[in-house]
């Protein structure tokens, strides 16, 4: 039986606005991010969402709680497998600061982003844990219902690339994809219009 999972990027934070790498650093939503979460809830109204899960990082679970409350879903399940990719020495820095402070590491990372920066998380590990978290969510959905997962742009792009063979462009805050899951396989993945 196919199950539907909506996978959405959290709302904006101050670090998003400043172009800083967040990774595992716990940064809260700003006012614009809260509004983006409210708009996400409106887009998903009528989509059959009966369960909401989120990364355990504040920007994701805060977004998820706003959506869950608007949709009448009782609680948000926090799952660390849905976290953003750890960006090690780059966390808290802008791209320009990464290049200035860690020129060799930045060049190596830009040459092959799958490896991750020093102290960071390899892309393969991100995909494995994201896949496990999304499949858990899909298996918990009752027939006729859907699950919403609120996660992070880098982790989402890595998972989507592993499913479709092509990474989407950088994701806006609130960007959402619809995944159809059959058993332990991803049948389809498409952006939600």
Image (cartoon, helix red, strand yellow):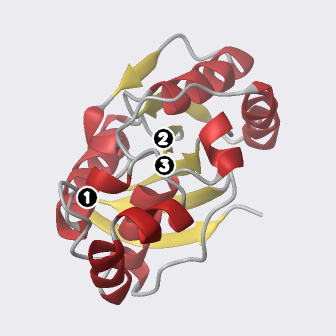
The residue tagged 3 is 152
Comparing 21 with 54, the one in front is 21
Which residue in the rendered view is the most extreme toward the front? 100
Give SS at disc 3. loop
- Tell which tag, 2 or 1, sits nearer the viewer: 1
Residue positioned 67% across, 48% down in the render: 18
Give SS at disc 1. helix
Q: Are dots 2 and 1 in contact, CB under 8 Å?
A: no
Image spot of residue 68 (x, y percent):
62, 21
> What crowding class fits label 3: few (fewer than 14 Cα within 10 Å), some (14-19), or many (20 or more)?
many
Comparing 134 with 82, the one in front is 82
Q: Is residue 141 above or below residue 162?
A: above
Q: Is residue 64 above or below residue 166?
A: above
C-alpha gap between disc 3 and disc 2: 10 Å
In the drawing, what numbered circle is on residue 149? 2
Q: Is residue 180 visible?
A: no
C-alpha gap between disc 2 and disc 1: 15 Å
In the drawing, what numbered circle is on residue 148? none
Image spot of residue 143 (x, y percent):
45, 40
Comparing 48 with 60, the one in front is 60
C-alpha gap between disc 3 and disc 1: 11 Å
């Amino acid at each position: 039986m196919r199950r539907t999972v909506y996978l959405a990027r959290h709302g904006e934070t101050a670090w998003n606005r400043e172009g800083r790498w967040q990774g595992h650093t716990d940064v809260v939503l700003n006012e614009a991010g809260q509004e983006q979460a409210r708009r996400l809830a409106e887009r998903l109204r009528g989509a059959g969402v009966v369960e909401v899960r989120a990364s355990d990082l504040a920007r994701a679970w805060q977004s998820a709680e706003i959506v869950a409350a608007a949709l009448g879903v009782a609680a948000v399940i926090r799952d660390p497998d849905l976290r953003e990719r750890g960006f090690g020495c780059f966390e808290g820095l802008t791209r320009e600061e990464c290049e200035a402070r860690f020129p060799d590491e930045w060049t190596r990372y830009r040459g092959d982003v799958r490896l991750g920066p020093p102290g960071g998380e390899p892309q393969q590990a991100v995909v494995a844990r994201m896949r496990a978290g999304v499949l858990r969510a899909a298996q918990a959905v009752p027939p006729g219902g859907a699950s919403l997962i609120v996660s992070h742009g880098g982790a989402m792009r890595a998972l989507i690339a592993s499913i479709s063979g092509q990474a989407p462009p950088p994701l806006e805050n609130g960007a959402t994809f619809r995944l159809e899951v059959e058993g332990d396989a991803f049948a389809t993945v498409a952006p939600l219009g």
